[in-house]
Image (cartoon, rainbow, N blue to C red):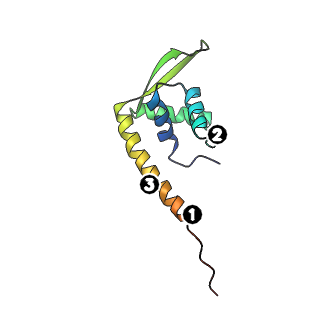
Amino acid sequence: MPMLRGTLDPLVLKAVSWSPMHAFEITNWVEERSDARVQIDDGALLQALHRLEDRGYVAGDWGVTENGRRAKYYRITAAGRDYLRTEAARLVDHLGAVISILSAKTSKSRG
């Protein structure tokens, strides 16, 4: 299932709120926590990371992975934590409303 619009940025921020991560680690973290139900497109992730960095929600520093490769590690900023708190609450509320609608018992048809 494609990712719902507006969910990628909060998911990325949630991932890097645990510890600094590079892009591949972020993808793995999200996929593991969703039991592979949420898949992240590499291009969309890179766009999200640039967008979040431009907005000051993450800061990136170059480092070396366990495999000896150069990678940019992203960490959440104070502004990113504030944004994550607000967006997570909004998404949880919205998804709760959608669940309420979809789980409503249907009435017997009239007629």
Is 60 situated above or below 78?
Answer: above
Residue 92 in the image: state x and y as whole percent. Answer: 46, 51
Residue occupying image coordinates x 57% and y 63%: 102
Is 90 situated above or below 76?
Answer: below
Report if the CB atoms under discs 2 and 3 are less than 8 Å apart: no
Give the class, few, some or many, for how many residues have Cα within 10 Å of label 1's Cα (few <14, many ≥20): few
What's the CA distance linking mark 2 and mark 1? 23 Å
Tell me the residue that label 2 is attached to: 36
Who comes first in sequence, dot 3 or dot 1? 3
Is 31 situated above or below 107?
Answer: above
Mark 2: which secondary structure?
loop
Q: Nearer the viewer, mark 3 or mark 1?
A: 1
Residue occupying image coordinates x 35% and y 39%: 82
Mark 3: which secondary structure?
helix
104 or 94, nearer to the observer: 104
* Quarter of image, res 105: bottom right
Give the class, few, some or many, for how many residues have Cα within 10 Å of label 2's Cα (few <14, many ≥20): few
Tell me the residue that label 1 is attached to: 103
Residue 89 in the image: state x and y as whole percent. Answer: 41, 48
Q: Is residue 101 left or right of residue 88?
A: right
Mark 1: which secondary structure?
loop
Tell me the residue that label 3 is attached to: 93
Q: Identity of the amino acid at label 3?
A: Asp
Residue 29 in the image: state x and y as whole percent. Answer: 56, 32
Q: Identity of the amino acid at label 2?
A: Ala
